[in-house]
Structures are given as C-alpha cells and as structure tokens.
Image (cartoon, rainbow, N blue to C red):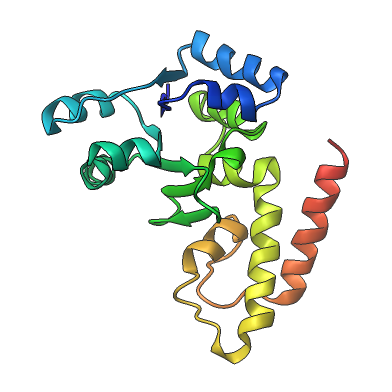
C-alpha cells in the first residue's frame, strides 16, 4: 500500500479551504491508513529520514520548512528515496510540476481540493500511476496534457524541442507508439476528442 504524509502546521487550513464533504473523504483516507496528518517533523537528519522513509508521497507546507531551515534537507531525502513530493503554500501563485513530474509546487487552495482525497485513495490502492497529475488536473489529466502538447506545437513551430518534451509524449502516447518524434496534430486531435467523449459519459 502506498502511504501519504501531509505536514500542515495549521490543520484548520484544510477546514477553511475544503468543502465539508471533501474533508470527510480526507478523514476517511486517514481512517483507512492511507494518509497521515502531522503538524511537526523532527529537524535532525537521522530522525527526519526515519519518519519520511515510511511514506512514498510527502506533502509539506513550504512556510514550515523555511521556518525550520530544513527545505534542502527534506528535498535531498525525498529525491534520494525517489518519492513523490508536494510543496504547497498560499504564497505559491503557479502550480508547477518539476523533477520528471515527481515534484509538484502548488497553491494551498489548489492542494486542498476535491481532487486530494480521490488521488490519495487511488494512489494507496494502486489505481493510478500518475498521482501528481491527478492531483493537479483530476481524472482528466490526460486531456490536459494533450491540450498542453497541442499548444506547444502550435506555439513552438519549427523551434519545438522534441527531446525536452519526450516524457510528455510518452505519457500522452500511452505506449501507442514509440514517441521518438513529434506526434501528428491529427493524432492529437483524435485523442482529444476521445478524452472529451470519455468525460461526458461520467
């Protein structure tokens, strides 16, 4: 089972930002053992590593790390363990995926959304291989990436960097082809329409 840790030094924050029904679902994740909420972590390397190694996804409010001077240490431990890492804060204005989509910087209001308990459940039970994308975009993450890729081609034209976006092509091609070159706009448009159709049926 994949387990998630959320550190929030102000637990009332989730109650302010989340709808009641989503808070209930998040509490269900705690009760099932999929999620642990804490307000503090040890700050010594050994003790911190001992706690973090129990989880494969870790979300920490940025101000707590900055206040305790452990931002770099936590990043080092998480990267070494190859865990998913979410840094959230009201001061983060743009949601951004980094480190090969293993890290997500997120605004606190976007983090405490209806997507959070759904993603935690699906991640814990092995139903998703892209938890950060699901947290960011919901179940329609592939549609969002297809639209992003189409825009990159439109805006990039002949300057489009195929090597830089290799991972993106792998995700949206879904192993349908070896994505060693630009996916055709016709193929992308067909996939966009399929994804849109899938979500009108939900």
Relative vertical location of residue 41 with respect to residue 140 in this rendering, above or below: above
How far across and how far down the image is residue 139, in percent?
68, 40
Residue sitting nearer the eye, 41 or 77:
41
Number of marks in picture: 0
Quadrant of the snapshot with the N terminus: top left
Residue at image position (56%, 47%) is 133
Would you say 109 lies left or right of 2 here? right
Vertical order, 171 against 28 (above or below): below
Left or right relative to 150: residue 32: left
Q: Nearer the viewer, residue 68 or 75?
A: 68
Residue 137: x and y, percent?
65, 46
- The answer to whether one can see residue 121 in this image is no
Q: Residue at x 29, y 23 (%)?
A: 54
Is 117 situated left or right of 43 in this image?
A: right
Report which quarter residue 112 is drawn in: top right
Q: Is residue 26 visible?
A: yes
Percent from the top left, x then y, of residue 124? 49, 24
- On screen, residue 149 above or below 156: above
Residue 126 vs residue 42, the one in the foreground: 42
| Furthest-top residue in this view | 31
Q: Give the residue displayed 83% in from the left and 35% down from the top.
A: 202
Q: Nearer the viewer, residue 80 or 197?
A: 80
Percent of width and height locating residue 189: 78, 68
Seen from this angle, which residue lies furthest bottom?
158
């Amino acid at each position: 089972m994949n387990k998630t840790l959320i550190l929030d030094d102000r637990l009332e924050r989730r109650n302010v930002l989340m709808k009641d029904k989503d808070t209930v679902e998040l509490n269900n994740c705690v009760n099932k053992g999929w999620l642990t909420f804490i307000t503090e972590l040890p700050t010594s390397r050994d003790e911190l590593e001992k706690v973090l190694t129990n989880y494969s996804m870790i979300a920490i409010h940025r101000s707590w790390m900055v206040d305790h001077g452990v931002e770099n240490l936590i990043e080092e431990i998480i990267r070494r363990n190859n865990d998913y890492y979410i840094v959230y804060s009201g001061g983060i204005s743009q949601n951004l995926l980094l480190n090969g989509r293993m890290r997500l910087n997120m605004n606190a209001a976007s983090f405490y959304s209806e997507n959070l308990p759904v993603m935690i459940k699906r991640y814990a039970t092995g139903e998703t291989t892209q938890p950060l994308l699901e947290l960011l975009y919901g179940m329609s993450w592939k549609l969002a990436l297809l639209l992003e890729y189409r825009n990159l081609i439109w805006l990039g034209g002949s300057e489009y960097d195929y090597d830089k976006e290799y991972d993106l092509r792998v995700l949206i091609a879904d192993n349908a082809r070896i994505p060693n070159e630009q996916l055709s706009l016709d193929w992308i448009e067909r996939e966009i329409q399929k994804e849109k159709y899938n979500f009108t049926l939900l």
